[in-house]
Image (cartoon, helix red, strand yellow):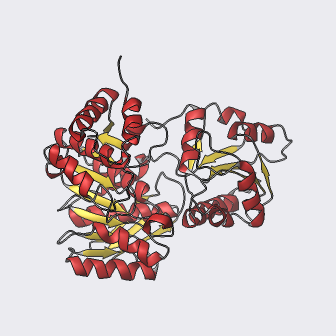
Amino acid sequence: MSQNSGDFLERFLALHPKKIDLSLGRTLDLLRALGDPHKALPPVIHVAGTNGKGSTTAFLRAMLEADGRRVHVYTSPHLVRFHERIRLAGKLVDEERLIAAFETCERVNAGAPITLFEITTAAAFHLFAETPADILLLEVGLGGRFDSTNVIEKPLATIITPVSMDHMDFLGDTLAKIAFEKAGILKKNAPVILAPQASEAMDVIERQARRVGAGPMLRADRDYHVSEERGRLVYEDAQGLLDLPAPRLAGRHQFENAATGIATLRLLFPDFPASAFEEGLRSVQWPARLQKLMRGALFERAPKGAELWLDGGHNPAGGLVVAQAMAERQERDPRPLILISGGLASKDTGGFLKAFAGLTQELLAVPIPGEHAARSADDVAQIACAQGLPATAASSVSSALEALAARAWPIAPRVLIAGSLYLAGDVLRENRTPPD
């Protein structure tokens, strides 16, 4: 009987260790048995942080590819298909190669306890090592210090995007503790690029950088600056000023994510052409990050003339930047703003929704299909009401959109679907517009 990659993922889940072991031991053991593919990779840019990791990585990829470079990318989680996590020299891994890598890892692991992320990261390294490329953009899965990606001994550079409160059950209950875990990716002599940080997080990261002897450090708002002027991105550092087009990705926070990418490439490649920055900003894609849906099965169910937006934000900091982006859009083009939201029980749903109080006319709470750890729609609605958002429960995103479409709207509404990457993935799946 033929197997697909999903069959392997199910078997890998069954190997999850019964004892919690916060270390890199299992990953290193498997990599050693595979012939140490992590030591045969192209130069690595390692990216950690709470918010903005994926967007910063997307900007880096777009700019590097605009300069004609072959780029591997490793990100997580995926939205619709696992294949989204592994991009080989510009293209998502195909099913045949993914199955072959999974078969190799399963055989070599020989049934030993291992987490899903550990064994699939090993498979990714196996694929990256056997496929020629100029650079690997490696995104941390969770934290940094004990993340399976943190086996790279000599990265080309390390990036830490904004650190905020998330995954507190794994990383700690203070910003300082979380920042310490993120700073675990810093390495001796490797350059460090720091996006804007709260002072508590910045102090921890800088202290860790000094402790390990990390290479030159670039800090946002000290060593490089970004601003929006007349709808364009203006970037400035010691090398001079760049007047660039606004990022294709929506939201003021994307100017900062783009600047982190620009600062990294200007540090690593002083002659990096301005034309590649321009093309990268225009061509960048990163699904479910304030993505405007323009077509699809769900789009057809929305009120006629409505704007339909999708975002995977799920923590308080993510809520703030998405709400700010929506507020800016509301100021330019006022419309009724409706929020459709669902969330996981492990997330601070109230903290996320708080940012929308006074901005959103109404919230429709929905479940996340197939996620046993998801909050019920009634639970999300109660949390929203406690934050001052008028809220009712709906059975699904589709039914919520149909209910909105049945109303008479003097002005077509702006509808934002947000609250979880898992919800965003389900929307893209049901809308039939998965990432390509």
- Give the quarter of the figure containing the C terminus: top left
x%, y% of residue 143?
Answer: 39, 63
Q: Is residue 194 left or right of residue 109?
A: right
**Residue nearer the viewer, 232 or 370:** 370
348 vs 432: above or below: below
x%, y% of residue 416?
Answer: 66, 50
23 vs 77: above or below: below
241 vs 415: above or below: below
- Give the quarter of the figure containing the N terminus: top left
**Residue nearer the viewer, 272 or 57:** 57
Q: Is residue 133 left or right of residue 388?
A: left
Callout count = 0
Q: Quadrant of residue 86?
A: top left
205 vs 298: above or below: below
In percent of the image, x 75 and y 48: which residue is there? 413
Of all residues, the one furthest to the front in this rendering is: 18
Q: Quadrant of residue 106?
A: top left
x%, y% of residue 363?
Answer: 75, 54
Q: Is residue 98 left or right of residue 195?
A: left
Of all residues, the one furthest to the top in this rendering is: 1
The answer to whether residue 174 shows anywhere in this view is: yes
In percent of the image, x 46 and y 38: which residue is there? 435
In percent of the image, x 56 and y 38: which residue is there? 428
The answer to whether residue 238 shows anywhere in this view is: no
x%, y% of residue 66?
Answer: 30, 47
Q: Quadrant of residue 315?
A: bottom right
